[in-house]
Image (spheres, rainbow, N blue to C red):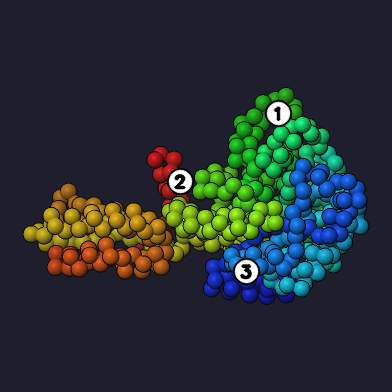
Amino acid sequence: MKRIRTIIFAMMTATATMAQVVIDVHSHIITPEFVSSLESEGRLMDEGFPLPKYDIESHLRWMDEVGVQTSVLTLAAPQPSSAEVVRQNNEIAARIKRDYPGRFLFCAALPLPDVSKAIREAIYALDTLKADGIKLATNVGGQYLGSPELDTLFSVLNERRAVIILHPHRPEPVNRQVMQQTPLAMHEYLSETTRAVSNMISRNVLARYNNIKVVVPHCGAYLPLAIPRMKSLTPVMQTNRMVGEIDYEASLRTLYYDLAGAHSPETIRMLLTITTPDHLLYGSDYPYVTPQALTQSLARMKQYLSDEYDLAAFKEMILWKNAKWLFDQTGEKPTAASAGENMIVRIAEIEVSPEYLEKYLAYANEVDRLSVEREPGVICLFPMQSAEAPTTIRILEIYASEDAYQKHLNTDHFQKYKQGTLHMVKDLKLPTMKPLDDEMMGHIFKKMRITK
């Protein structure tokens, strides 16, 4: 089965490379059986808002329209009360995966808070149904992730190197008046996610079971703010014997983050203060958001991942490469360094005839300014003149990729510069430079953003 999975992902990779498609790690399956079970228990409004309608044909239609090659299905909130309903929904998700190879993966639900039943279902789902991971709620009936009684479940998942997709559920207990005034999805879901992950970190659950990979939803919730605060307060808590040693770095290495919800360049930069680009994933939250809104949201993400010079190198990683590696875990893992391999960096060496120096400088300043202003793929064109030899010009050139460079060569402003200065240049060298540290450019861009 692992070989079949690898072949499917190889096909996905080839398709993604050609069509620049997307892998969506955050989508929900809402079956009639699931809805019926909630209705019979009077729990349809447990989360404070109605469940959206779902059918596989509409999901596929939207995926095809926007170029989502594969969606990872998880059961929506609330948690079913019956282990039989959980099993039924897992088997339906497995059948969808079989019926549409390469289009759907699924992470199985578990019948918590019964840990023994949850372990049996996890083993059945992963070993028999060939689930691609496990979906865990932040809490079920007040049993929060990180609780000691869940350690045996995490041990089983750790042995199988499972991918876990988290999703917030209604907090327990809950203030229903507050819930009505501020619906869960607006605020409390973010708090709930942060609460559950922080609980796991403080007990070193993620550090102890570090074969597990955990996907945190909704742009990491409040974790970029919470993690620094937790670290700063840990010594005080330890002095008062409230917590023990906490291995933050080991825990953070297990965490991945989907960008469903209010994503933006600023949000991604904030996430990069606690993680690395290879841990960021695209997520849609289908069908909780209308297809039209999701289409616009994905288009906006693709645009700023192309336009923002400090994020452009990570575009394919975020849209599909990271997810492909996470669920396949074969081949070379994408890294920030590998994302920057296509970047062109060089220092152009130009010798200008003295009689044309003033005119050349005017041309150079114009083309460099227009290129940086108008071309997203032109990261830097910075001309410099030697103080000792004024006719010696050096231009620091950084292009996001070979494609960006070729587009630059065909722009009107570059052609004007090229044709206008041919007779002015005595000598031209264009040596491409190889960075000694591939990751340093990212640090430079981040510092530029901070100090701007």
Q: Please tell me the numbered disc located at residue 238.
A: 1
**Pointer 3: what residue?**
64
Within 10 Å of disc 1 (Cα), the crowding (few <14, some 14-19, many 20+) is few
Q: Where is residue 38? Give x, y as percent.
A: 87, 51
Q: Classify the position of the N terminus by image quarter.
A: bottom right
Q: Which residue: 76% across, 69% down?
A: 97
Question: x, y percentage for residue 381?
Answer: 31, 56
Q: Is residue 104 visible?
A: no
> Upstream in the sequence, badge 1 or badge 2?
1
The x, y position of residue 87, in whole percent, is: 88, 60
Q: Is residue 250 above or below residue 8?
A: above
Q: Amino acid at mark 3?
A: Asp
Q: Nearer the viewer, residue 381 or 207?
A: 381
The residue sitting at the left extreme is 355
Q: Earlier in the sequence, mark 2 or mark 3?
A: 3
In the picture of the structure, the residue carrying the numbered disc 2 is: 446
Label 2, residues with CA under 10 Å away: few <14, some 14-19, many ≥20: some
